[in-house]
């Protein structure tokens, strides 16, 4: 698909496509105007008045393996969060009295796609990314909240969760991405209220073309201007052992490291 073919609809299709475009990802997350839930200090001043003092952006190193495995570290390597018990039995879920445990993972169901292989309509499945803190990274990993699960009737004005303008292809840290300016409508509901991808007024978004991850958001208007996040994708679909996510390592040897052999006299 060439740059001239990108439209608001193709941007929405890309935002719905993340569950089918990767299984593991390693990245760094940089947040502007971070909340205390994200590991940043409290922000002083009223955001609406434009007087907020933005703290130094905390950089988080993250590893995600679908479904449900997450590891978060500071830039210096301090462990902040790690999903545990990822291999424990989930039998209690299947007697919980609701149907959600019986839904299949997205990779096992087929969505309706356009000619470019992007998702037009999502099927019912067990969606959701592992979250840390405010959920900022989880929202960015699957940015469907800015597009909705399916197209809306054409005869209903402002039925989309957001209006999309100025769609074009850009480069984000060496990777192709789709950039657009979005303005939320009244039906916009962020998956994580503490970490919306769209701010009041206009928001600039970049969606990675290969993974459909939201690699950048930046508020353009009002007291939140400049708030958002930037993400550096370091590895996609790398092999990740359970040890990376468990709280207690199984003690496997890193074969990349030199192992000294001490010989007796």
Image (cartoon, helix red, strand yellow):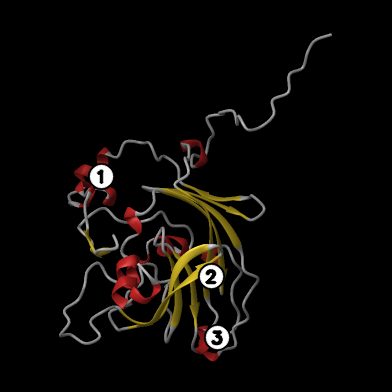
* Closer to us: 175 or 245: 175
Please give the name of the residue rendered at 23% of the width and 82% of the height, measured from the top-left corner. 159
Dot placed on the residue nearer the N-terminal end, 1 or 3: 3
Please give the name of the residue rendered at 55% of the width and 68% of the height, measured from the top-left corner. 31
* Residue 205 in view here: yes
Dot placed on the residue nearer the N-terminal end, 2 or 3: 2
Q: Answer with the quarter of the image where residue 12 lies.
A: bottom left
Dot placed on the residue nearer the N-terminal end, 1 or 2: 2
Estimate the spatial distance between the alpha carbons at disc 2 and disc 3, rounded to whole Å.
14 Å
Question: Label 1 neighbourhood size at 10 Å, few (<14), some (14-19), many (20+)?
Answer: few
Relative side of 42 to 25, left or right? right
Name the residue tied to disc 2. 35
Q: Position of residue 101 (x, y in %)?
A: 23, 48
Q: Position of residue 107 (x, y in %)?
A: 28, 49
Which image quarter is the C terminus in?
top right
Name the residue tied to disc 1. 93
Please give the name of the residue rendered at 36% of the width and 54% of the height, measured from the top-left corner. 21
Relative side of 106 to 183, left or right? left
Numbered mark located on residue 46 in the image: 3
- Classify mark 2: helix, strand or loop: loop
Which image quarter is the N terminus in?
bottom left
Question: Label 3 neighbourhood size at 10 Å, few (<14), some (14-19), many (20+)?
Answer: few
Estimate the spatial distance between the alpha carbons at disc 1 and disc 3, rounded to whole Å.
43 Å
Assess whether mark 2 and mark 1 are in contact (beta carbons under 8 angstroms): no
């Amino acid at each position: 698909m060439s740059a001239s073919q990108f439209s608001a609809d193709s941007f929405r299709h890309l935002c719905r496509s993340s569950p089918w475009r990767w299984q593991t990802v390693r990245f760094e997350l940089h947040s502007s105007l971070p909340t205390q839930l994200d590991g940043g200090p409290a922000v002083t001043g009223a955001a609406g008045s434009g007087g907020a003092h933005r703290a130094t952006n905390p950089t988080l190193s993250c590893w995600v393996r679908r479904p449900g495995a997450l590891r978060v570290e500071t830039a210096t390597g301090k462990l902040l969060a790690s999903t545990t018990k990822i291999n424990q039995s989930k039998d209690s879920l299947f007697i919980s009295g609701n149907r959600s445990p019986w839904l299949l993972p997205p990779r096992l169901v087929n969505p309706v796609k356009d000619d470019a292989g992007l998702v037009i309509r999502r099927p019912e499945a067990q969606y959701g990314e592992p979250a840390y803190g405010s959920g900022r990274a989880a929202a960015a990993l699957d940015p469907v909240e800015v597009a909705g699960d399916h197209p809306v009737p054409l005869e209903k004005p402002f039925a989309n969760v957001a209006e999309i303008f100025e769609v074009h292809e850009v480069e984000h840290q060496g990777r192709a991405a789709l950039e657009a300016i979005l303005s939320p409508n009244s039906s916009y509901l962020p998956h994580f209220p503490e970490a919306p991808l769209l701010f009041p007024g206009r928001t600039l978004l970049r969606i990675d073309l290969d993974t459909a991850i939201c690699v950048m958001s930046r508020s353009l208007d009002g007291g939140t201007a400049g708030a958002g996040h930037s993400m550096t994708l370091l590895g996609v679909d790398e092999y990740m052992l359970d040890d990376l996510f468990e709280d207690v390592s199984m003690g496997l040897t890193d074969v990349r490291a030199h192992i000294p052999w001490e010989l007796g006299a």
